[in-house]
Image: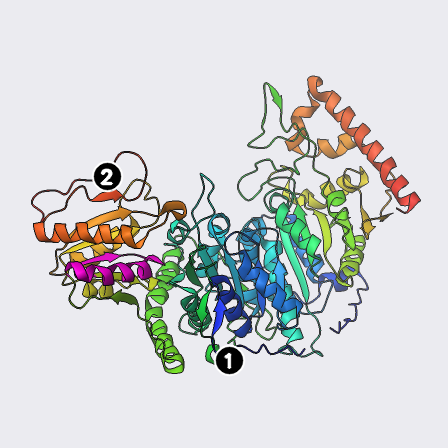
């Protein structure tokens, strides 16, 4: 079947969902199996429209739930072709069982996760509670901060996921609404260039290869389960190399450079926040404006959330005196994930910065430039005073009396 | 898209059928006397075509694919308890996509796609997934290995468990006769999806069964087969009595054998020469033994009445052809 070629302008105006849809189309995905959920719905709607208009010769399978969508992705992937889906929030929560099965079975799948809060209370807006729910699922997890990056990351996700040394599913994250529904300039690749970059799908143990029947999804008990999970983790850790290679190839092709850990103004900064998603770019503005006040601040964000770039995070933060780890998810009775992981990264290094954990932006609550400037000003005070200005964990931008937890022990700093 | 219609495998007699080349190997861990393996062999041996098989978590899966062993000499996949149907729908859709794109050449014969699930994964936890697959019209055969209980986990009730059966989660006791609900009518429900072919089979009636499986294989679209699978462990009969108990099930009309074509046309495919009382079927299985206490005898009478009414209903449905 011949599919139509889509003529793209040098610069398109796409939101994050369209960026995903176009990356799917250009990657020549064989099967997209999906179920609609706000705010990722448009990723699939756009794709269905491409299909309806003859731009796609793969199959679109609209299932009766997200669990079924991911189940179909695993079946289709095991059959021997390129698969993708998109979801958010409750949909991710419903398919979580199959996320573990996909990674455990080493099936390449690309999942565009448009980050949204988890109920209850029901909320359709962006936060990172669904992203954090995938933490231990064995998927590679990459984060985009704007629609251009969503396009780039989703396109690269196929190449990383299907690499013979990796063979692991990949989540391409973006913030719900802030990225998914905000149209911005996106520089796309031409269809052929994009498709060639991703490359042809390499079949491994395909169910549809009848010359070599294979058994997928076996049972292992205490005799073999540990070895399987250990090898799976080793493969996830080793994927770092392929991710870096893919980033390098992409830079050569587009000039756009990505790193395992992104940062802004880190060179001379005394203080830094660590965050994920769109907050990175908001922080860039705040940092620029604060230079007038003599505050030299930085923002650091893991581009690759899994495998967690522990060494690179530690290296990036060696010279700052105070760090606020900003977690956009209800921490569920402990410190936030970024706080935990960044603290863990720094512990076996000489650096002993002041560490605080800011819980912010839940359910799409705005984090503005002004809000970030306040955070940086306070960090600056803490760095100068050599001690935390309050408890370790603080809720920022929430109504009601101040909410903070955990006292620093002993003489910090 | 061109559909290559494969020639149907000729099955002359039971001897040639039972000695056919096996794609489900003899080495597995199913209980002696388990009907699952008989059903699976009868399904797989009904065709020479390439096969992709999926299985739900359950007895069949845990007894045939324990690393580093496999009993399957064909493409086989298991994901979870509830999603074996959708796993296969994914495989079938990928097959379609790769043919559309010319990555599988048009002259490659179409494989067959077969999914096996127990009644737990069919009637209960996987029902939504199966319903979705049938609504979307995937070209595959779903075979329910119906042993009326969660046998793999030690005999808990499912929505296929018949009234009066004693199970570990609805046990018979001093104040209970066991299961309180009647078995869900899954065959009618699947026919109501408008599936092109739906049938109930029993492995002891192998000729009837293989005819239906071959009809299913030559049908384009989703096919549902409800296969009675007598369970020596949970029905509590001796392992050498599987075929005898199965004969009682079909000859008492507790498991009538019939098919429904296109959701409308019902054909009864087996009419017992001598109909056996339901009492005899129940009496052969200790899972029902408490029903023979005087205070529960009425349940056996009610059961007989329901079976009689159901048989009349099936014959009327057959007669009116709609």
Residue B223 locus on image (x, y percent): 73, 55
Total marks placed: 2
Vertical position of residue A177 compared to residue A107: above or below: above
Q: In the displayed structure, would residue A296 be above or below residue B260?
A: below
Residue B55 image position (x, y, % from top left)? 59, 55
Q: Residue furthest front?
A: A292
Q: Chain for mark 2? A: A
- Residue at position x 14%, y 55% from top? A353
**Residue at 65% of width from left, 79% of height from top?**
B102
Which badge, 2 or 1, is on the more N-terminal residue? 1
Label 2–label 1 contact, CB within 8 A: no
Residue B242 placed where, x, y %? 69, 44
- Assess whether residue A290 is covered by the magenta stretch: yes
- Locate the N terminus of chain A by quadrant: bottom right
Look at mark 2 in the image and give the residue it sits on. A404
Q: Is residue A266 visible?
A: yes
Q: What chain does badge 1 belong to?
A: A
How far from the left and from the top, in percent, is residue A412? 9, 47
Instruction: Determine which residue is flagged by label 1.
Output: A190
Q: Is residue A202 magenta?
A: no
- The magenta stretch spans which residues? A270-297
Can residue B29 be seen in the rendering of this structure? Answer: no
Asked if residue B24 lies left or right of residue B195, the reply is left
Up/down of B239 relative to B78, above or below: above
Residue displayed at 22% across by 62% down: A298
- Residue B263 vs residue A57, the one in the foreground: A57
Choose top left, top right, bottom left or bottom right for residue A234.
Answer: bottom left
């Amino acid at each position: 079947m011949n599919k139509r070629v889509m003529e793209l302008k040098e610069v398109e105006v796409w939101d994050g969902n369209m960026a995903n849809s176009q990356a799917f189309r250009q990657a020549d995905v064989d099967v997209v199996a999906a179920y609609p959920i706000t705010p990722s719905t448009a990723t699939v709607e756009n794709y269905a429209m491409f299909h309806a208009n003859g731009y796609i010769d793969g199959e679109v399978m609209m299932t009766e739930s997200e669990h079924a969508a991911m189940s179909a992705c695993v079946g289709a992937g095991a059959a021997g072709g390129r698969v993708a889906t998109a979801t958010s929030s409750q949909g991710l929560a419903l398919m979580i069982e199959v996320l573990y099965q996909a990674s455990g079975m080493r099936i390449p799948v690309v999942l565009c996760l448009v980050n949204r809060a988890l109920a209850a209370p029901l909320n359709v807006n962006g936060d990172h509670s669904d992203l954090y729910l995938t933490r231990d699922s064995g998927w590679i997890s990459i984060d985009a901060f704007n629609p251009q990056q969503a396009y780039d990351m989703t396109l690269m996700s196929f190449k990383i996921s299907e690499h013979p040394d990796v063979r692991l599913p990949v989540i391409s994250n973006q913030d719900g609404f802030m990225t998914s529904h905000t149209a911005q300039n996106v520089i796309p690749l031409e269809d052929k260039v994009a498709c060639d970059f991703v490359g042809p799908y390499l079949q491994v143990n395909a169910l549809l290869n009848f010359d070599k029947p294979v058994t997928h999804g076996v049972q292992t008990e205490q005799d073999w389960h540990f070895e399987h999970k250990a090898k799976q983790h080793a493969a996830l850790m080793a994927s770092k190399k392929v991710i870096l290679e893919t980033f390098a190839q992409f830079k050569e092709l587009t000039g756009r450079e990505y790193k395992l850990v992104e940062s802004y103004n880190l060179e001379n900064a005394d203080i830094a926040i660590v965050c994920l998603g769109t907050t990175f770019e908001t922080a860039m503005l705040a940092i620029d404006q604060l230079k007038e006040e003599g505050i030299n601040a930085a923002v650091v964000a893991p581009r690759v959330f899994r495998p967690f770039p522990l060494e690179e995070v530690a290296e990036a933060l060696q010279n700052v005196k105070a760090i606020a780890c900003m977690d956009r998810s209800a921490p569920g009775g402990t410190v936030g994930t970024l706080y935990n992981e960044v603290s863990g990264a720094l512990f076996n290094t000489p650096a002993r910065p002041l560490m605080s954990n800011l819980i912010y932006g839940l359910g799409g609550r705005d984090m503005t430039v002004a809000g970030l400037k306040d955070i940086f000003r306070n960090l600056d005070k803490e760095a100068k005073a050599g001690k935390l200005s309050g408890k370790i964990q603080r809720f920022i931008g929430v109504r009601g009396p101040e909410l903070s937890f955990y006292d620093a022990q002993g003489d910090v700093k | 898209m061109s559909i290559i219609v494969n020639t149907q495998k000729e099955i002359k007699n039971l001897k040639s059928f039972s000695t056919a080349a096996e794609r489900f190997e003899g080495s597995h861990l199913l209980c002696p006397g388990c009907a699952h393996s008989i059903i699976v062999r009868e399904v797989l041996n009904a065709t020479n075509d390439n096969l992709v098989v999926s299985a739900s978590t359950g007895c069949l899966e845990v007894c045939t694919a324990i690393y580093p062993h496999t009993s399957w000499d064909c493409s086989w996949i298991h994901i979870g308890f509830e999603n074996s149907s959708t796993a296969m729908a994914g495989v079938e859709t990928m097959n379609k996509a790769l043919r559309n794109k010319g990555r599988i050449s048009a002259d490659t014969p179409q494989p067959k796609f077969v999914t096996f699930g127990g009644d737990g994964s069919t009637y209960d936890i996987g029902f939504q997934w199966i319903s979705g697959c049938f609504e979307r019209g995937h070209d595959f055969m779903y075979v329910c290995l119906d042993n009326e209980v969660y046998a793999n986990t030690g005999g808990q009730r499912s929505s296929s468990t018949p009234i009066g059966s004693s199970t570990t989660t609805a046990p018979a006791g001093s104040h209970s006769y066991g299961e309180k609900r009647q078995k869900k009518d899954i065959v009618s429900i699947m026919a109501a999806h408008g599936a092109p072919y739906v049938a109930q089979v029993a492995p002891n009636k192998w000729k009837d069964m293989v005819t239906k499986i071959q009809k299913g294989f030559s049908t384009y679209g989703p096919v549902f087969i409800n296969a009675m699978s007598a369970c020596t462990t949970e029905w509590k009969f001796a392992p050498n009595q599987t075929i005898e108990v199965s004969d009682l099930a079909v000859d008492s009309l507790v498991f009538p054998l019939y098919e429904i074509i296109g959701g409308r046309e019902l054909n009864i495919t087996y009419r017992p020469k001598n109909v056996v009382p339901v009492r005899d079927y129940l009496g052969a299985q200790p899972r029902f033994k408490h029903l023979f206490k005087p205070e529960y005898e009425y349940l056996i009478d009610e059961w007989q009445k329901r079976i009689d009414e159901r048989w009349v209903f099936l014959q009327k449905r057959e007669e009116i052809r709609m």
